[in-house]
Image (spheres, helix red, strand yellow):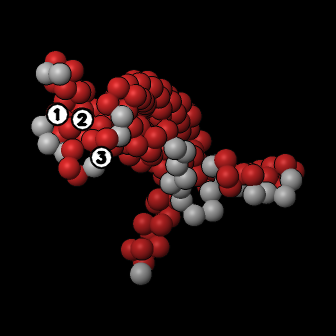
Amino acid sequence: MREQVAMAEINAVRARSVAEGPRSAFPGFEQVHLTTYVQLADAKASVFLAITSGAIAYSVGHYGLDWLHPEQFLGHSLLVALSTLLLVTSWALNIAVIIPRKNHPKDPTIFYDSVARFDSPSRYADVVLNMADTELFCEQMAYCHALAKICALKYRLLNYSLVLGIIGYATFLALLLFQ
């Protein structure tokens, strides 16, 4: 029990020194870094979404939807179906990248939806101003951690989308070449 109390005191001193020392600027730096990567993932997904939408629109406009009928599902129609399925899956994954995420700790004071739940700006200001420097620092670090998880998920979805899209485009190209 004494060891736990001693560790808690050591951690409190460490957190105070971090929140007041030169490392206090780190959460701001990390937040900008992570926000930039989230924006890049969204921008890349938007470009892939537009390109994939064009390929799907061309395929449906050129071949129609007759290939969806089981009796038409041989040879050339199989390539159309495979290509369209892969491109639509890639398209859906790009949408999933762009959708906003709310992956945050319980009762945060930083995330936009939590800030919007306050009755008034003065109530929010009171909560923030009554937080100790260490609490605010820890809140910022928790925010950065949540942003990092969001960023990792976006890039994982973007990678899946890219792989499926490349396979779908290759199939689509084969379809165009072997008409």
Mark positioned earlier in the residue sequence (3 or 1): 3
Which residue: 57% across, 64% down? 106
Quadrant into which the C terminus falls: top left
| Closer to the camera in the image, 133 or 126 | 126
Neighbourhood count class around disc 3 (C-alpha, 10 Å): few under 14, some 14–19, many 20 upward = few
Residue at 19%, 26% in the rendered image: 175
Mark 2, Cα crowd under 10 Å, few <14 / some 14-19 / many 20+, is: many
Instruction: Kindly tell me whether residue 30 is visible in this rendering.
Output: no
Q: Does the residue at mark 1 contact the one at mark 2 (Cβ under 8 Å)?
A: yes
Q: Quadrant of residue 1?
A: bottom left
Q: In the rendered structure, find residue 76 and report the number of the disc placed on it.
A: 1
Residue 68's disc is 3
Q: Give how far apart the Cα atoms at labels 3 and 1 are.
A: 12 Å
Q: Could you tell me the amino acid type at mark 2?
A: Val
Judging depth in this view, the residue of 64 and 99 nearest the camera is: 64
Q: Position of residue 41 (x, y in %)?
A: 43, 31
Residue 177 in sight from this viewpoint: yes
Amino acid on which disc 3 is placed:
Leu
Which residue is disc 2 drawn over?
80
- In the structure shown, which secondary structural element does the residue marked by tag 2 occupy? helix
19 left or right of 55 in image: right
Q: Which quarter of the figure has residue 165?
A: top left
Q: Determine whether the residue tagged by mark 1 lies in a helix, strand or loop.
A: helix
Of helix, strand and loop, which one carries label 3? helix
